[in-house]
Image (cartoon, helix red, strand yellow):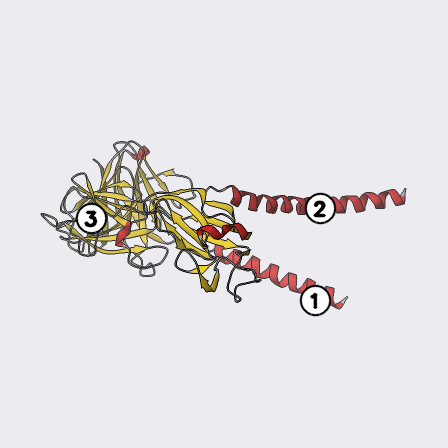
Amino acid sequence: MRTRHALLACLAVVFALALGSVALAGSTKPKLVGSVTAISGTKSVKIRATTTSTAVTVKVGAKLQLGATIVMGKGARATLRLKRPASVPKSRVLVYVKSAPGTKHTSTLTRDAKGILVTIAPS
Amino acid sequence: MLECRAVHRIRRRYVVVAAPLALLALLLATLPARGASSAKTVKVSVPASTMWMKTSVKLAAGESASITAAGTISYGSGDPKCQGIPITADGCAAETAAIAGPAGALVAKVGAGKPAVVGRSGTVTGPGTISLGINDYETEFGNNTGTFVVTITRGKAAKPALPDLPPATQSNARPVDAKSTTTGKSNYGGVTITRDGRSYRMTASSTLQTGDVISTDGETVLTIDFAIGGRTGLARNSSVRITGDRQIEGLRGTTMATPPSSLDHPLEIQTNGGILGVRG
């Protein structure tokens, strides 16, 4: 009987720890690395916050999460303003830029006092 | 009635436990079968009475295969140290035979190549078909008994050696580091440069020019610096073309770009067949 109680107590502790870790993981705030400052051809610029999330249409002023992917459609232009947070290592990719199938875009990267300016235009 | 219910309960329990066990057993049973059906590994029996036995394994030039042998034989030795004992594929070191090495050992030759002692484990290199045999004198095979069970595993096909990249006429970029993602060590051999339709091997001192296509293999990541500033990284299985002194075109895979510190020289990257990652 005592062994059974001990086993149940152990299981309860393990369950509580697992719940705690899941809650902690869920509460992690996504890191913001910048925003979209200009767009033309709004409907054809989409963003995927993470590799697994679905692509949604981007609006001017949209915040960019660390590791987000911008998918550029036909004829679309966009300007992004990025700044690496101090907690993010230099080797980490802030955002990804991808051209939709059959399209070509040129990204121009410049750095100034405010951070990085990425201008994406059709090529 | 009660008895019947109890029997049902026991049967249900048995099904609940037995079904997953049966599934697991089925899965385990299929695993060795999958390995055996692989064309990469071939198992053959080499009787001690055979001088040379041709296998079905034909190696391409530069391709290697590892050979492991199990089992024991007897070769009618004249040396008391080797008589009456089971001889492994390493042979009996106290006695030599036709091929330099211990008598009774497993020997191999590839194509018309020189035969050599393989022993219980060894490697052979192509080109040609692998033949296996026993190290004994040509007229002495009649009194040999036993069999070696030999496993031949094909190795990786050797890459054709590429020439080193010649110096660029106008250097736009140079490599910083090429690293293997499996070993973490420098691996310039995993980077191929195509210039004017010819393929070259990248070295640490290579210089890149406009028009060069840089490709990484499945285990190498590359970092290149532009002469005017700015850094670009290539992920595994990626290709880029240098299109100017500060422009590149992503052809395949993922290209990572770090903009230069000076605003006078922005970095331009065209994405038409790949993904661009912006680093801070």
Q: Secondary structure at mark 3?
A: loop
- Specify the label residue B7 is tagged with: none
- Chain for numbered disc 3: B
Nearer the camera: disc 2 or disc 1: 2
Residue B129's image quarter?
top left
Question: Which residue is label 2 attached to?
Answer: B18
Q: Within 10 angstroms of label 3, few (less than 14), some, or many (20 or more) residues?
A: few
Mark 2 vs mark 1: tell me if same chain: no
Name the amino acid, label 3.
Pro
Name the amino acid, label 2.
Ala
| Inter-mark Cα distance, 1 to 3 | 69 Å
Nearer the camera: disc 1 or disc 3: 3
Picture quarter with the C terminus of chain B: bottom left
Mark 1 vs mark 3: tell me if same chain: no
Callout 2–callout 1 Cβ contact below 8 Å? no
Residue A105's image quarter?
top left
Name the amino acid, label 1.
Ala
| Inter-mark Cα distance, 2 to 1 | 29 Å
Q: Is residue A12 something that shows in the picture? A: yes
Question: Which residue is label 1 attached to?
Answer: A6
- Chain for numbered disc 1: A
The residue positioned 51% from the left and 46% from the top of the image is: B44
Q: Within 10 angstroms of label 1, few (less than 14), some, or many (20 or more) residues?
A: few
Q: Position of residue B11 (x, y in %)?
A: 79, 44
